[in-house]
């Protein structure tokens, strides 16, 4: 590791006068980059009235990040951590959320990737590989008025390559932690149509640090996650298009629901298929987009309350030699239709009018178990009813019953651009059959002064409770609440941006007021119930980011977030670092690049310590079509721990090879 660090220093110092590479200017880049997700129409980044980040392919490679969570860890306003089971999770703006991260929505080329039964994108794909992504767009603030429920904090759009931009991409990476990523992308063209197919396969086994459960048993904390993802997009010159995104996940967890170390028999197999067929046509001053979708989601998960590899469980007389295990299955289908029509009125602006109808149908559930869930009593474990062998249980013993949710949502958008001013208005009315009616809106204003952009964004976002939050039953730890109301998030976000040729700075302040905040209310020392908070939850904070180019080939980045206050409710949702700092120094030469990046979090709570880590990334272009990357995560091997002493990344060496043309 010392040799790698010395090599980095030589790379950063020696080539100052040797490099002839001319870097783009920040100002020109902001005018050239096109953003789709802010308005569902392409706009130059400099014209977007909402606070927005665009992470380009060059920056993704320079940072050496391989998936979406690695990328978000480099941004000051996001908090990345691992959940109790080792799943990736992310929070933003001082709000940690559950491991589902349901207040942040992910799109792929503008198509939402989320399971409607829990409102989460990250329960569909827990990795989101960036191998075939051209750029990442992040739009901050209330976005449910444009994209529907649950986009309260941010929308993230992964923009893939078009057939005209790249024909073939092969990418493979391996690590000393026994993790690996492999991807393949091929574009094609025919008479009147074009398309792209990509495949990603990944395995994750790290971290491997020791974990001690509450009974004192220690073992390496090593989960196993295997994921296969495909993405297909087709477009015809007539205006017809088709997009299909599929995920097959196989996760094995190191811990049980009861916080005991297990032998890997706690698992979750998930499959998600998101499909959209539509027609998009430009008719002069009019544009029309009509689509029909059919999405499908499947979950099978197995867990044991007291694993027999644990000495405590194997010696319990009441179990009579039977391990209390259960296997749950859920089937969700999600059909829907939508239409969006826009009319350009020239100097009077552009009006968008749309409507969507959506069905979230949990049409089948099944539970097989060697015990009765309704008999589990954490205060008196002796009342547990245990069978000699696993059997299919009746519906009344299930954890969820079949349920259908229908949503109808008309919406509008008005965009007015006048010289140095831009005004954006959004509104959406949502009607559901089980939660009620809600209206969300946003108002965004942009004022341009030379190379400065001053922005103000305000509005209301709405998140409706998931099926698990409303209808879960027979769970001794967590109870559903069918009377839950939708969660309203009002916010104000003033921001500024300056884009010069070699200097860039931006900042944003934010204030959120959550009404009917959905949280887990303790009803006993062991049991929680989903409920709406009686008081308003208020969060205040600010983000500042700075970039500077030196000598044509060096870039310095500094960013930070500070949470000034959280009021109205305490608990796990706000176990969030009040301060975060990121800093990076990069060298970009003709055939090689190098970067060193630091991320530091303050203490999240009395039980979750702060930490800092340093990452290193080197890359070489050793031919016109081939590139080699060498990365080191957590270079100094700092010990990182999340809630319940769940370990974070250890020092890991990555080697990646890429071939593309």
Image: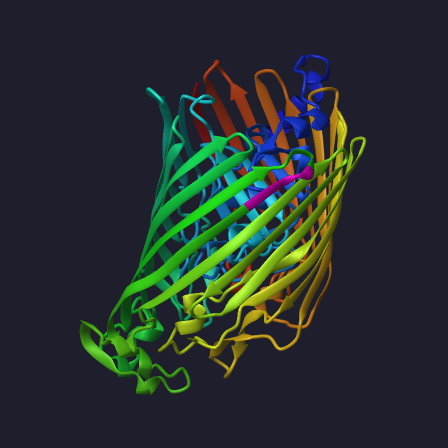
Which picture quadrant has residue 350? top right
Q: How is the image coloured?
A: rainbow
Q: Main secondary structure of the magenta part?
A: strand
Q: Is residue 300 above or below residue 317?
A: above
Query: At which x and y percent is residue 562?
Result: 73, 54
Start and end of the magenta stretch?
Answer: 348-352
Query: At which x and y percent is residue 211?
Result: 47, 60
Query: At which x and y percent is residue 329?
Result: 28, 63
Residue depicted at x 72% and y 52%: 493
Q: Is residue 538 above or below residue 10?
A: below
Left or right of 275 on screen, residue 390: left
Query: At which x and y percent is residue 443?
Result: 68, 51
Which picture quadrant has residue 323? bottom left
Left or right of 392 on screen, residue 91: right
Task: Say which of 495 and 58 sits in front.
Answer: 495
Task: Say which of 95 and 451 sits in front.
Answer: 451
Q: Is residue 96 visible?
A: no
Q: Quadrant of the N terminus?
A: top right
**Badge count:** 0
Q: Quadrant of the C terminus?
A: top left
Q: Is residue 499 visible?
A: yes
Left or right of 54 on screen, residue 275: left
Q: Residue furthest right?
A: 449
Residue depicted at x 69% and y 18%: 14
Q: Check residue 580 for magenta coloring.
A: no
Q: Is residue 401 above or below residue 220?
A: below
Left or right of 425 on screen, residue 98: left
Task: Say which of 505 and 342 sits in front.
Answer: 342
């Amino acid at each position: 590791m010392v040799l790698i660090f010395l090599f980095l220093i030589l790379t950063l110092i020696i080539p100052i006068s040797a490099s002839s590479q001319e870097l783009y200017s920040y100002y020109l880049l902001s005018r050239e980059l096109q953003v789709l997700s802010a308005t569902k129409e392409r706009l130059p980044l400099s014209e977007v009235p909402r606070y927005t980040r665009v992470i380009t392919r060059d920056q993704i490679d320079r940072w050496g990040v391989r998936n979406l969570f690695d990328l978000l860890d480099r941004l000051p306003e996001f908090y990345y951590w691992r959940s109790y089971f080792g799943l990736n999770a992310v929070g933003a703006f001082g709000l940690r959320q559950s491991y589902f991260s349901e207040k942040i929505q992910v799109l792929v080329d503008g198509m939402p990737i989320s399971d409607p039964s829990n409102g989460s994108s990250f329960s569909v794909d827990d990795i989101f590989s960036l191998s075939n992504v051209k750029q990442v767009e992040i739009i901050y603030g209330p976005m449910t008025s444009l994209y529907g429920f649950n986009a309260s904090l941010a929308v993230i759009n992964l923009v893939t390559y078009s057939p005209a931009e790249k024909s073939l991409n092969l990418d493979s990476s391996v690590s000393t932690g026994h993790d690996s990523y492999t991807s393949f992308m091929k574009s094609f063209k025919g008479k009147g149509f074009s398309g792209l197919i990509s495949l990603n396969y990944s395995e994750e086994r790290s971290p491997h640090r020791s974990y001690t459960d509450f009974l004192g048993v220690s073992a390496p904390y090593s989960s196993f996650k295997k994921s296969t993802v495909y993405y297909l997009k087709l477009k015809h010159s007539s205006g017809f298009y088709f997009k299909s995104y599929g995920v097959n996940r196989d996760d094995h967890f190191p811990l049980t629901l009861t916080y005991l170390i297990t032998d890997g028999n706690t698992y979750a197999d998930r499959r998600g298929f998101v499909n959209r067929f539509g027609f998009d046509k430009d008719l002069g001053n009019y544009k029309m987009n009509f689509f029909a979708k059919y999405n499908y989601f499947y979950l099978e998960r197995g867990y044991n309350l007291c694993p027999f590899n644990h000495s405590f469980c194997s010696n319990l007389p009441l179990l009579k030699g039977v391990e209390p295990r259960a296997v749950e299955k859920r089937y969700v289908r999600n059909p829907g239709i939508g239409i969006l029509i826009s009319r350009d009125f020239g100097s009077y602006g552009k009006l968008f009018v749309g409507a969507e109808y959506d069905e979230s149908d949990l049409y089948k559930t099944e539970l097989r178990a060697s015990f009765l869930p309704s008999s589990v009593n954490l205060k008196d474990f002796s009342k547990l009813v245990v069978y000699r062998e696993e059997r299919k249980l009746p519906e009344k013993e299930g954890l969820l019953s079949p349920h259908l949710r229908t949503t109808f949502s008309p919406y509008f958008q008005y965009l007015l651009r006048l010289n140095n001013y831009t005004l954006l208005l959004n509104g959406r009315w949502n009607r559901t059959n089980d939660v009620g009616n809600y209206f969300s809106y946003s108002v965004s204003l942009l004022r341009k002064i030379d190379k400065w952009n001053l922005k103000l964004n305000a509005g209301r976002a709405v998140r409706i409770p998931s099926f698990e939050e409303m209808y879960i039953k027979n769970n001794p730890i967590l109870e559903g609440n069918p009377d839950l109301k939708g969660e309203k998030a009002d916010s104000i976000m003033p921001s500024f941006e300056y884009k010069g040729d070699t200097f860039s700075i931006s900042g944003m302040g934010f204030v959120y007021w959550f009404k009917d905040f959905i949280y887990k209310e303790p009803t006993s020392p062991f049991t929680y119930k989903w409920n709406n908070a009686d008081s308003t939850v208020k969060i205040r904070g600010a983000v500042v980011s700075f970039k500077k180019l030196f000598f044509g080939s060096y870039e310095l980045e500094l960013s930070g977030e500070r949470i000034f206050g959280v009021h109205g409710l305490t608990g796990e949702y706000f176990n969030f670092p009040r301060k975060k700092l990121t800093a990076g120094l990069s060298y970009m030469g003709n055939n090689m690049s190098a970067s060193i990046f630091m991320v530091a979090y303050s203490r999240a709570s009395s039980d979750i310590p702060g930490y800092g880590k340093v990452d290193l990334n080197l890359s070489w272009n050793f031919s016109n079509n081939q590139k080699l990357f060498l990365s080191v995560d957590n270079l100094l091997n700092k010990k990182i721990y999340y809630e319940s002493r769940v370990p974070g990344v250890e020092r890991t060496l990555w080697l990646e090879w890429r071939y593309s043309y």
